[in-house]
């Protein structure tokens, strides 16, 4: 064979080798990019999961707190109603007409000479 044919064959082989190297680099770059994209996607998914969990947890706490507040308000209303009832009973027990009836039953009478007006 002549030298030009050999050079052409060598040139074709070197081109094929260069092409193979470029293809290998491209495959390697694609693999690196896919790994990076996977990692970024995983990180974003984890962040979203953490944020969602935090929001749900806070909503649960808010709901529990609101329930506790409602229970306390109900107890407060019940105690206020009971206090009003007790005030009415105390006023009824201290009424003059009731005290006079009790005094009469006990044999006590009202003597105007023993009364004094205090200013």
Image: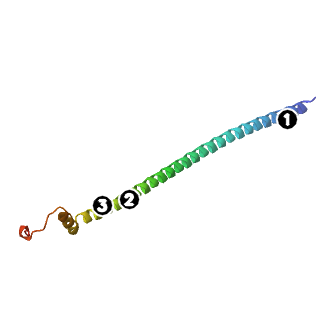
Q: Are marks 2 and 3 in contact (CB under 8 Å)?
A: no
Instruction: Describe residue 61's horizontal placement relative to residue 1 as left or right.
Output: left
Regarding mark 2 in the picture, which secondary structure is present there? Answer: helix
Instruction: Describe residue 79's horizontal placement relative to residue 95 as left or right.
Output: right
Task: Look at mark 2 in the image and give the residue it sits on.
Answer: 78
Question: Up-down: is 101 above or below 24?
Answer: below
Question: Up-down: is 87 above or below 34?
Answer: below
Task: Look at mark 1 in the image and give the residue it sits on.
Answer: 12
Residue 42 location (% of width, % of height) = 62, 42
Task: Look at mark 3 in the image and give the residue it sits on.
Answer: 86
Quadrant containing the N terminus is: top right
Q: Nearer the viewer, mark 2 or mark 3?
A: 3
Question: Up-down: is 29 above or below 105?
Answer: above
Q: Nearer the viewer, residue 67 or 87?
A: 87
Q: Which residue sits furthest left? A: 113
Quadrant containing the C terminus is: bottom left
Q: Earlier in the sequence, mark 2 or mark 3?
A: 2
Q: Residue at x 40, y 55 (%)?
A: 72
Regarding mark 1 in the picture, which secondary structure is present there? Answer: helix
* Mark 3 and mark 1: Cα distance apart in space: 110 Å
Q: Nearer the viewer, residue 114 or 32?
A: 114
Q: Nearer the viewer, mark 3 or mark 1?
A: 3
Q: Residues within 10 Å of mark 3 (few under 14, many from 20)?
A: few
Regarding mark 3 in the picture, which secondary structure is present there? Answer: helix
Q: Earlier in the sequence, mark 3 or mark 1?
A: 1
* Mark 2 and mark 1: Cα distance apart in space: 98 Å
Q: Are marks 2 and 1 in contact (CB under 8 Å)?
A: no
Q: Residue at x 51, y 52 (%)?
A: 59
Q: Residue at x 35, y 58 (%)?
A: 79
In this figure, which colouring scheme has been used for the structure? rainbow
Residue 16 location (% of width, % of height) = 82, 35
Residue 103 location (% of width, % of height) = 17, 64
């Amino acid at each position: 064979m002549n030298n030009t044919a050999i050079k052409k064959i060598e040139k074709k082989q070197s081109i094929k080798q260069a092409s193979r190297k470029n293809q290998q680099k491209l495959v390697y770059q694609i693999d690196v990019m896919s790994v990076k994209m996977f990692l970024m996607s995983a990180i974003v998914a984890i962040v979203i999961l953490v944020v969602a969990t935090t929001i749900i947890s806070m909503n649960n706490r808010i709901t529990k707190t609101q329930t506790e507040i409602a229970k306390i308000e109900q107890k407060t209303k019940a105690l206020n109603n009971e206090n009003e009832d007790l005030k009415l009973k105390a006023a009824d027990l201290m009424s003059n007409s009731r005290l006079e009836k009790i005094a009469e039953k006990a044999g006590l009478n009202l003597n105007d000479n023993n009364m004094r007006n205090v200013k």
